[in-house]
Image (spheres, coloured by chain):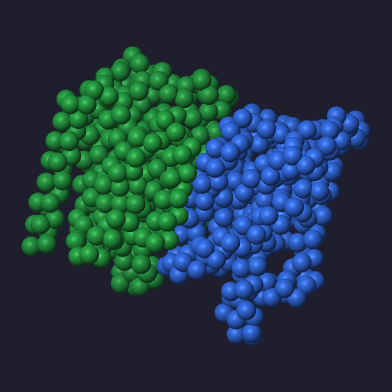
Amino acid sequence: MKHKTALSTTTIVVLLLLLLAGAGNVLVSNQALLVDILMFAALTQGVNMLYGYTGYMPFGYVAFFGVGAYGFAISVKSLGLDPWLALLCGGVCGMILCILIAPLLRLKGAYFAIATLAAAMAVKELIANPALTPITQGPYGMDVSDVLAASKSYWSLTVILVLSTVAAAYLKFSRFGLSLRAGRDNERSAATAGIDVVRGRVVTLCGSGLIGGLTGAAYAWNIAFFYPDAVFGVNLSLFPVIFVIFGGAGTVLGPLVGAAILYSLYVFVGVSNPQYFQLLYGILIVFLLLFAPGGIAAILRRIGIRVF
Amino acid sequence: MNLLLYALIAGLMFGVFFAAVSIGLNLLFGVMRIVNVAQGDMMVWGGYLALTLYEVFHIGPLFAIPLVFVVAVLCGGIAYYGLMPRVLRAPDPSLVSLIVFFGISEILQAVAMIVFGADQRFLPRELLGGDRTVYMFDHAYPVAWFIVGSVSAVIVVLVFAYLYKTRLGYATRAIMSNRGEAASVGINVSRISAINFAIGIGLAAIPGCLVTFIYGNLSPSSGLELTIIAFAVVIIGSMGKPMGALLGGIIYGIATALMQVYLSSWSTFFPNALLLVIMLIRPSGLLGSRAREA
């Protein structure tokens, strides 16, 4: 019974997302804004997959995004691949990075967060290094305008968002997700009960990195030209982290709602007055963590509404 | 050979400075198990405060240090009672404190941007020796480096004197090694934590008075880079051990200087990579015990 409800609710959410993406594509003239919204929503779901179900906070999530963008651009430019294949390459690059940094899962809590941030900065400095100009163009930026296809990349971003939402729903309702949460809440008890805690975490990390990499690749396809600073900007991982906490980690809809509310706030205040938005953002983070650590989802749950 | 000596001497001076930069972070982590990711921004604020003191009252950076320390300690005391009771009640205080301090870092950056503007600023070089240099082993070193290095050494020595020679320091070290046992022998853990929190914030701010003479200019956004350096230093040494800050600082300083002399295009890649490698092969740092506590 529970699984049937979960399945039908997931279907409704997916249809709703597709409908919104379609309506946005027709009704909103500012395509760049829509692409940003889709991108942030997908990244938020990616962070949610890892933080919401395993408790590991990826402060350097942007690393997967940036690697995906560069994976896409290099596959198109140097290998001459078809953009669709290059998109997959971007996702695979994200996964490869996950396998490389998987040993960091041995670190706990704040250590993991700092280590992933350092990893993201190390990857950026590596890619932006002038010594690698023949491959990555170093600090001079990547140009993939030859394969620019605004509509295809828009819909691939939508599909990635749907994919990540389905993945979050899977983690919330499946046996696998339950075992992950058991490992998060008490590693030893979970292991005693026969759960392979480490395997579950590595798989989830790879899934999360795949989403990050795909999102980066689709984003690169859409904007056609980018600098290392643009695809490795710290905000690209910090915004999703806050969206997840604001909406409620470990729920399917919470992060999406969090992203929608906070990102609109950013568009209305942040673009014209970035420093005032930053101030507001900082105050919001402090107050959220102190007074409502479970985000909107926890507040709703307190008054009796269960968030999907 | 002389180039190697140059790197070693410059690295040592930078290293002592980095030790002073990170000792506050280490104290906070050791006593409270909390992670201050706003360390760099607090330092930037210390720098802006020193700049303002100079421009308005003509107080030089060395005399600004005690003033900045007092102001930062007061702010730290207020912040402790506003934030910490709730943070410490959370299920995972170290991760919650990390995110809360990240929020504080955003607030400090935004206010610095609103108050001081986005321009890069620095204290006039003449205040610490100007263009004068010291000539050693065929290389010239700015006098300012020696002054900053010695002042930093004094700061580090004072922190050690506080920890090892005062009653409060004894109690602090007792809390660092075991909170529960410290409480059971009658140490007022919450009051001493509050004092050390305030001192930790004070220590975070004072290297800001010196930073423009040795490392780089001040701008509201330079905090993150400084935070990463402080983290690298503390993690190399090992978190929560004051001696680790000194060891980590010197290793980091000399390693960075060697990178700049021999492989300068990789010198920005290096601190992050070093941090990662140390976390992977020896997560508790060079002086750390085998058990992880956070």
- Is residue A83 left or right of A14 when viewed as pictured? right
Q: Residue at x 36, y 53 (%)?
A: A245
What x and y, as percent, mark residue B92? 45, 65
Q: Residue at x 76, y 50 (%)?
A: B65
Question: How many circles with numbers are drawn on the protein?
Answer: 0
Q: Quadrant of residue A43?
A: top left
**Which is more toward the observer, B214 or B5?**
B214
- Is residue A238 left or right of A36 when viewed as pictured? right
Question: Quick one: which residue is furthest to the front in this view?
Answer: B56
Q: Residue at x 76, y 67 (%)?
A: B162
Label the blue chain with its letter: B
What x and y, as percent, mark residue A25? 19, 27
Q: Quadrant of the N terminus of chain A?
A: bottom left
Q: Residue at x 52, y 54 (%)?
A: B101
Residue A114 seen: no
Q: Quadrant of residue A66?
A: top left
Label the green chain with its letter: A
On screen, residue B233 above or below B178: above
On screen, residue B271 above or below A188: above
**Which is more toward the observer, A149 or A77?**
A149
Residue A149 seen: yes
